[in-house]
Image (cartoon, grey):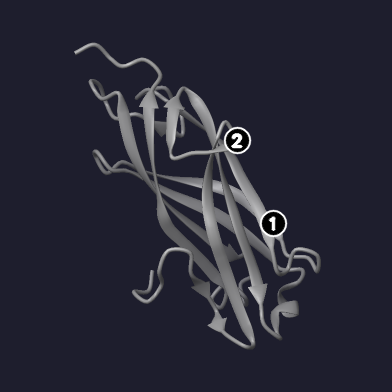
């Protein structure tokens, strides 16, 4: 990711002509309530708010985009990639689009969940999530892309493990 991009930024950023915004990524526990501390076992979803501005933004109408979440477990560096689905920009969602990916699962180590706690005796884990949105069509892909690298969540076991 280029050094000049901060969490929630996107390219192009060429106003007044065209700007891609990835305004926010919010974690929804159970797919409903915003939260950053998730109890395992449970589910969570990612809600993204994004949009296109500028005089050339109508050129994006009809373009499909793909969402990918890169997840790193902080305790041991274990990494996974979650494919968050895709959406197509329309005239009605051009300037503001809310897209939700998931649900993803949480669970103990070895459970097969998307967000697994570190190996025992850990009863919680910390995860860093980098969300990447890019155009599907090859001619557009090098020009329009967004990143959000500001989300950290804790997944904790519903019942603490005995010492």
Residue positioned most to the right: 91
The quadrant holding residue 95 is bottom right
Q: Residue at x 50, y 59 (%)?
A: 132
| 22 left or right, relative to 149 | right
Mark 2 lies on a secondary structure that is: loop
Query: Tag on residue 31?
Result: 2
Residue 33 locus on image (x, y percent): 57, 36
- The reply to whether residue 136 is in sight is no
Compared with 150, 35 (above or below) is above
- Foreground residue, 112 or 50? 50
Residue 46 locus on image (x, y percent): 55, 45
- The answer for how far apart the CA atoms under marks 2 and 1 are is 19 Å
- Foreground residue, 35 or 148? 35
First along the sequence among labels 2 and 1: 2
Q: Quadrant of the N terminus?
A: bottom left
Query: Tag on residue 87?
Result: 1
Mark 1 lies on a secondary structure that is: strand
The quadrant holding residue 140 is bottom right
| 12 left or right, relative to 37 | right
Residue 55 locus on image (x, y percent): 71, 86
| 126 left or right, relative to 105 | left
């Amino acid at each position: 990711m280029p050094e000049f991009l901060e969490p929630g930024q996107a390219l192009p950023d060429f106003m007044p002509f065209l700007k891609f915004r990835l305004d926010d990524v919010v974690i929804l526990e159970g797919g409903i309530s915003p939260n950053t501390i998730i109890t395992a076992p449970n589910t969570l979803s990612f809600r993204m708010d994004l949009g296109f501005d500028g005089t050339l933004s109508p050129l994006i109408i009809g373009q499909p985009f793909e969402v990918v979440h890169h997840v790193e477990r902080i305790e041991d560096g274990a990494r996974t990639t979650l494919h968050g689905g895709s959406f197509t920009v329309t005239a009605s969602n051009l300037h503001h689009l809310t897209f939700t990916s998931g649900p993803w699962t949480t669970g103990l180590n070895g459970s097969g969940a998307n967000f697994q706690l570190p190996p025992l005796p850990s009863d919680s884990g910390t995860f860093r999530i980098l969300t990447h949105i890019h155009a599907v069509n090859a001619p557009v892909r090098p020009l329009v892309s967004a990143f959000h690298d500001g989300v950290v969540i804790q997944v904790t076991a519903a019942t603490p493990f005995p010492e």
